[in-house]
Image (cartoon, grey):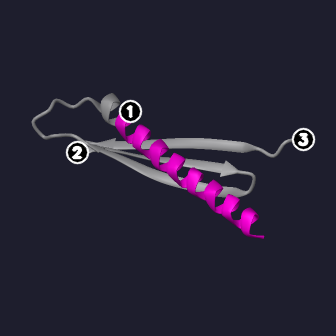
Amino acid sequence: MEPEITISIHATDDESGTVAVASLDLHGEHFEAVGEAHRNPIDPPRPRIGEELAIARALARLEADLLEAARDKIDRYLVH
């Protein structure tokens, strides 16, 4: 049986913006990243747009962290 890989995303918003937290559990390793989107006070509230931006930013950071972890593992295996 393959080990589980899970990803979860939680977004919260208020009148000024949205914060999203993306979490990834990958074979016993945990990665977590935060993305934010802030609304210009003169713009009408559109929570869905802020949610999309915050989630996209959290996932982009999660991607960068995951790539860095993979590069570190490659470096370790090439050295040892």
**Label annotation for residue 52:** 1
Earlier sequence position, callout 2 versus callout 3: 3
Asked if residue 36 is among those painted magenta in the image, a careful observer would answer no
Alpha carbon separation for disc pair 2 and 3? 45 Å
Q: Measuring 71% from the left and 43% from the top, which residue is drawn there? A: 5
Question: Is residue 65 toward the left or the right of residue 28 in the image?
Answer: left
Q: Measuring 43% from the left and 42% from the top, which residue is drawn there? A: 11
Could you tell me what secondary structure mostly forms the magenta stretch?
A: helix
Alpha carbon separation for disc pair 3 and 1? 34 Å
Query: Taking 41 as reference, is 77 above or below it?
Result: below
**Label annotation for residue 3:** none
Quadrant of the image occupied by residue 17: top left
Q: Which residue is mark 2?
A: 16
Cβ–Cβ under 8 Å for marks 2 and 3: no
Please tell me whether mark 2 sits on a helix, a strand or a loop: loop
Magenta part of the protein: which range?
51-80
Residue 44 locus on image (x, y percent): 16, 29
Disc 2 versus disc 3: nearer the observer: 3
Label 3 neighbour load within 10 Å: few <14, some 14-19, many 20+: few
Q: Which residue is mark 3?
A: 1
Please tell me whether mark 1 sits on a helix, a strand or a loop: helix
Identify residue type, mark 1. Answer: Glu
The quadrant in which the N terminus is found is top right
Q: Measuring 52% from the left and 42% from the top, which residue is drawn there? A: 9
User: From this viewpoint, which residue is outermost toward the front?
Assistant: 78
Identify residue type, mark 3. Answer: Met
